[in-house]
Image (spheres, rainbow, N blue to C red):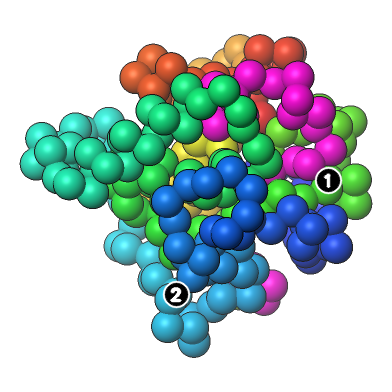
Amino acid sequence: MNNDIVEPFPDSQISDAFRAHADSGLPYEISESELRILQDSSIGPQHPAYRHLPPFLSMHDAYRRLISRHQGEESSPNWQAARRRYVHAMSAPYGSLDLPIKMFNDLDTLIFHGDLKHRVNMRWETCRRAGLCRPYETLLGITMAPTSWSIPRIRIRINIDVDWRKVPRSQLIGTVVHEMLHAYFYVHCGVAGHRDLVMGGRMDEGHGVYFYAAGRQLERRWRLTLFDPWDPTGLC
């Protein structure tokens, strides 16, 4: 979901309290420096970790790029290591709120060809302060495009107000991948990534033909739930 925000909202103390760290929470192989880059909302073009966007594609070409499976890529040591960590994390008996953030780079490697790394800022955040057209506790995630004034990178926020204890891990990680899919189309299509082809039903410009087609394929391949089964719209 990314069209309900009245205006961008700054990081809160709640968001700071739920920052992930490499030496705490659920063990996962990711460095503290990478977690810091992912969660730092202030990183912009002057920062050495900032990664510029590539030349823009059409929604169709971005979709084709996403679903193409490259044998060389999937046989690489980095991809295979990310897959092992993914399988272990999804089958582990316990989870934690830092797990989705720690898994971000691996999900990017496995699903998005590494296109999101250092281009996206992701944090847990309360959505009580955001201007929404729906109850804040029913919103799972928000993705915002970068702006020239306050959001230097694509921004993903996962809603801490949701009772995630009642949500299967496949849906928690699926929610992250759902928002990463929004980010992917922003990376490759700019603001046109929120102007998908709409064919009626539950679709809107942010969740149109290409988004649905990609999302359903990712659900099947990775056994995730990208579309909220309890939401009457089936969207974010």
In the image, is 152 to the left or to the right of 33? Answer: right
In the image, is 225 to the left or to the right of 59? Answer: right
Q: CA distance from mark 1 to mark 2?
A: 26 Å
The residue located at (9%, 41%) in the rendering is 72
In the image, is 61 to the left or to the right of 179? Answer: left
Name the foreground residue: 20 vs 222. Answer: 20
Q: Amino acid at mark 2?
A: Tyr
At which x and y percent is residue 6? 82, 52
Q: Amino acid at mark 1?
A: Cys
Is residue 129 visible in the rendered image? The answer is yes
At which x and y percent is residue 106? 39, 45
Does the magenta-highlighted stretch encompass residue 69? no
Which contiguous range is marked in magenta? 149-174
> Which quadrant holds the N terminus?
top right
Q: Earlier in the sequence, mark 1 or mark 2?
A: 2
Of the numbered discs in the image, which one, if any, rests on residue 50? 2
Q: Residues within 10 Å of mark 2 (few under 14, many from 20)?
A: some
**Residue 64 higher or lower than 14, as above or below:** above
> Where is residue 36, by image quadrant?
bottom right
**Residue 16 higher or lower than 4, as above or below:** below
At which x and y percent is residue 183? 50, 48
At which x and y percent is residue 99? 57, 42
Q: Residues within 10 Å of mark 1 (few under 14, many from 20)?
A: many
Is residue 147 visible in the rendered image? The answer is no
Q: Secondary structure at mark 1?
A: loop
Does the magenta-highlighted stretch encompass residue 155? yes
Of the numbered discs in the image, which one, if any, rests on residue 127? 1
Say if mark 1 contacts mark 2, CB within 8 Å. no
